Image: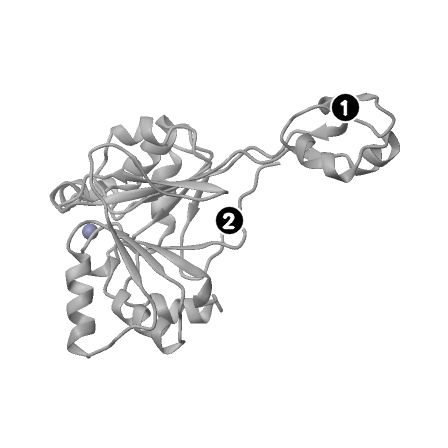
Amino acid sequence: MEENYFLIDCGEGTQVELRRQKIKFSRIDNIFISHLHGDHWFGLAGLISSFHLLSRTKDLHIYSPPGLKDAIISQLRLGQTHLSYFIHFHELEGKEPKVILENAKLIVKSVPLNHRIETYGFLFEEKKKLRKLNAPLLRERGVEVCDFRMLQLGNDVQSIDGKLIKNSEVTFDPPEPLKYAYCSDTAYYEPLVDWLAGVDVLYHESTFLEQNRDLATKTFHSTAKDAATIASKAKVNYLILGHFSSRYRNRDVYKEEAKRYFQNIEISEAGKIFSFENK
Ligand SMILES: [Zn+2]
């Protein structure tokens, strides 16, 4: 969302991948860790150290289930590292979605998931955008620049010669705000249907296929069918599948299974960029 970068989970290879993608570290101010299984945070201490080596001074915010702060602090203490910047650790909790971050453009909520240990997904909701101005018409009708803000907010204004300018005549509807949800790791979890209803893009883990339903159940992971069922019931626009097991011959098998239950499916892979925008 424009100048904000949000990092969700930070496995061992994250820093290498961020460098490969030429992501500016300085633009990451918020890191969201879904849970404390190693593949979701073992890269964090390294990234925190790199921020320090790059002489970061801006505060960093880390959101995670309880326990991460102690782990990171003891890693830093062992190396006698005194960071050049401050870290705010925000502990997630609750059995319902909760607002954990809000700025001028968006709201981020934690969303409880159903995994072997305490785990949260994250829901990013853009705020309503300003109305778009019909600039040539505004000039023609004699509207002053100082009134543009009022028009963007949806109000009527007066022209220089005192005529009423109706908002609907000189502005366009803004694009619908986008919603993105990230859910990893989790077993099939029915409350997500309501909590994620109507999101534009859902990333949902699909570690297994139905042929390994027993493993999915045992490890509290989802199958491609589970992910697609949530997507279908929640009426999302797009589903991105990820967190794949290496036991299957390729990733198309996930798409094949999921397609029986939901149409708009994408397969995630390292370095792949998905762009979504509302008109
Ligand atoms: Zn896990």
Any atom of ligand 1 within 8 Å of the CB at mark 2? no
Asked whether, in this view, residue 150 is left or right of residue 272, the answer is: right
If the image is split into quadrants, where does the C terminus sit?
top right
Residue with the mark numbered 2? 1
Write the residue at 29% across / 43% down: 121
Circle 2 crowding by C-alpha within 10 Å: few under 14, some 14–19, many from 20: few
Which one is earlier in the sequence, the residue at label 2 or at label 1? Answer: 2
Asked whether, in this view, residue 129 is left or right of residue 237, the answer is: right
Task: Choose top left, top right, bottom left or bottom right for residue 238.
Answer: top left
Q: Secondary structure at mark 1?
A: helix
Where residue 117 sits in the image (x, y, percent)?
A: 14, 47
| Along the line of sight, the residue nearer the viewer: 171 or 194 | 171
Q: Amino acid at mark 2?
A: Met
Residue 122: which disc? Answer: none
Where residue 133 sits in the image (x, y, percent)?
A: 72, 35
Q: Amino acid at mark 1?
A: Glu
Colour convention of the picture: one colour
Do tag 2 and tag 1 residues touch (Cβ < 8 Å)?
no
Where residue 30 sits in the image (x, y, percent)?
A: 37, 55
Where residue 194 sits in the image (x, y, percent)?
A: 32, 26
Residue with the mark numbered 1? 169
Write the residue at 49% across / 55% down: 273
Query: How many marks can you see?
Result: 2
Please determine whether, in this image, residue 255 is positioned above or below residue 47: above
Label 2 vs label 1, nearer the camera: 1
| Along the line of sight, the residue nearer the viewer: 77 or 192 | 77
